[in-house]
Amino acid sequence: MTGRRHEVPVIIAAAIIASGACGRPPEPATRAARNLLLITVDTLRADHVGAYGYRRARTPALDGLARGVLFERAYAAAPITLTSHATLLTGRYPPGHGARDNGLHMSSTVPTLATVLQARGFKTAAFVAAFPLDHQFGLDRGFDVYGDRLPRDAAGRQANERPASAVVNDAIAWLSFLAALPGPPAPPDQRFFLWVHFFEPHAPYGDDTSRPVLDRYDDEIAACDREIGRLLNALGARLAETVIVAAGDHGEAFGEHGEYAHSIFVYDTTLRVPLLMRLPGDMSPRVVTDPVTLADVAPTVAKLLDVEMKDVDGIDLTNAFTGARLPSRELYAESFAPLLEFGWAPLRAIRSDRWKYIAAPKPELYDIEKDAGEQSNLVSTEETVARRLDDRANRYSPSGLPRTRVIDASGLDRLRALGYSMGPRHELNGGGGRTDPKDRREVAARIAQVTSGELSGDALQSALEDILRVDPSNSQAHMRLGYARLAKNDCARAEQEFTWAIDGGLPAADAHLGLATCLGRRNDLAGAARVLAEARRREPSNPIVIANIGILQATRGDNAAAIRSLQEALAADPNLHEARFNLALAYARLGRRADAIAAAEELLRRLPADAPQRGEVQRLLRSLQ
């Protein structure tokens, strides 16, 4: 991805140590914990961080945090960005906070670290790097500032992520603002909670897809680590009084178990994460080998900050900092993405002592002490254990879900652009007879390759055709194949794909926009108008649909109606540059030169300096003046 190679040559020397951790108990911290910095890195595998023994790592900032506590066996509660972050902030497993998949809203009544610390007088801020954590999903509660504004490209399209350098710039600016606050209390006494989220290791991995994927993945991690170092430097003297937690939200699969990317399966490939805690004061490094869950983070840091998180599923881990063993317990994880995105059965997992059980139509049981790679399914030979753990999984969550408020269709499109949500949302009742995701492993892998951005051109089209041979009702794949064929001017076959996508119940208007484009190219303007009218019925406030209606109205000679539609679209989204250009043209056709000039000049002000459209806008202005 562009803009990700910002070099930061200096990292605070105090944070850099060898990745090995000493086994003796740490000395008592010399300073009280006053502040909290939570760093989350999307899609970060523990085994690609130097502190976890990865020889090729370029992660000195993360490795430096091993000066505190390194959790060797830390696990996410879901391999899904929103779901896992909600668990981190609430201390609850997904059934307890409600955000069971990307696009499902977290409960508005569940306490979070931010709401609890804000109530205790902490200044709170979050700066996130990608749309799955947008404020609309409920993670913003309790934050004085929630920085989730994403940039636009030269054409005015909203990006779905932003580089680590931009996130850290915002976080450092907030820290500077905090230091400048007038008293009382005096700024040095003001406590804070800062959460900073990075998206770098998420697919697609860099721009040069000719290089090996793991090399590019490591590059993304290194770019993120440099920005973490810059953020730590910015703490200055406040570092000595700040608890720093760094965690991955989930891992990433590169072919293990036939899986690519994440979100569908609940093997440790995508559940195991790095978890590091650096405490104020001087202490010797400690490695905690007992299994822990990201649900433990909230109650642990609350204890360190002398506050309390109530009604949590996680536990306070601070006893382990002095060498005590953690109590034996079971850990829960799940993925409801198979149900919500494809209509397949969800997966729920229980980790208990040596066993890990996965509840599915074809259940799985692994002895993870002997079989850490989860290769040998023992469910048929250990039936008693399997029945017991299946009962436990059902106590955490049934295989169905209550009806939940779901993200709107335009938001689903933005998640799909990041590799999530290939299909329309399905009925939430788990029910019997649903397909086991393992039986769709190959199609899931192809879907992951498509949505990761790692394929293009003929390879992308071939992958979509493969998906549809196995899963012919996949409306999202039909829509994507339609656009692939449209790019090759194969409108005849593209029209059919868009029609199948619409008939399959795809909730968004993307397929309608593609079909309308095809109809317009063969001069069936009446047909294009009918399709766009249906798109607006589905998404009445979608400014892109409204802008396309306006452009079509202008093409049909109804410039007055076009102006009304284009003005409406721009009122909803002022950065739809093509809409503003067509508005200027419609004004010009009606002889409204002053309005046309004003629209064109406003477009020039909004376009980036290097935008290729500037020349065409300048030519229009010269013709009007």
Image: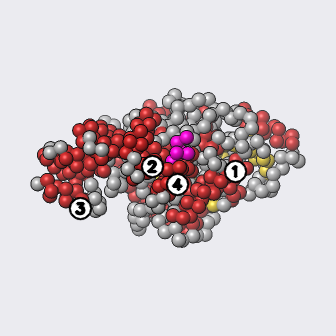
Residue appearing at x 65%, y 40% in the figure: 343
Q: Which residue is mark 3?
A: 615
> Label 3 is placed on what type of residue?
Gly
Q: Nearer the viewer, mark 3 or mark 2?
A: 2
Instruction: Determine whether label 1 and label 4 are within 8 Å by CB.
Output: no
Q: Nearer the viewer, mark 2 or mark 4?
A: 4
> Label 1 is placed on what type of residue?
Arg
Residue appearing at x 69%, y 50% in the figure: 440
Question: Can you give x and y, in whole percent of width and height, for residue 397 in the image?
Answer: 68, 34
Question: Can you give x and y, in whole percent of width and height, for residue 615 in the image?
Answer: 23, 61
Please, what secondary structure does the residue beneath circle 2 have? Answer: helix
Q: Nearer the viewer, mark 2 or mark 1?
A: 2
- Membership of 268 in magenta stretch: no
Q: Which residue is mark 2?
A: 514
Instruction: Determine whether label 2 and label 1 are within 8 Å by CB.
Output: no
Say few, some or many: other residues with alpha carbon within 10 Å of mark 2 (under 14 / 14 to 19 / 20 or more): many
Where are the magenta residues, as a range? Answer: 498-503
> Label 2 is placed on what type of residue?
Gly
Q: Which residue is mark 1?
A: 440
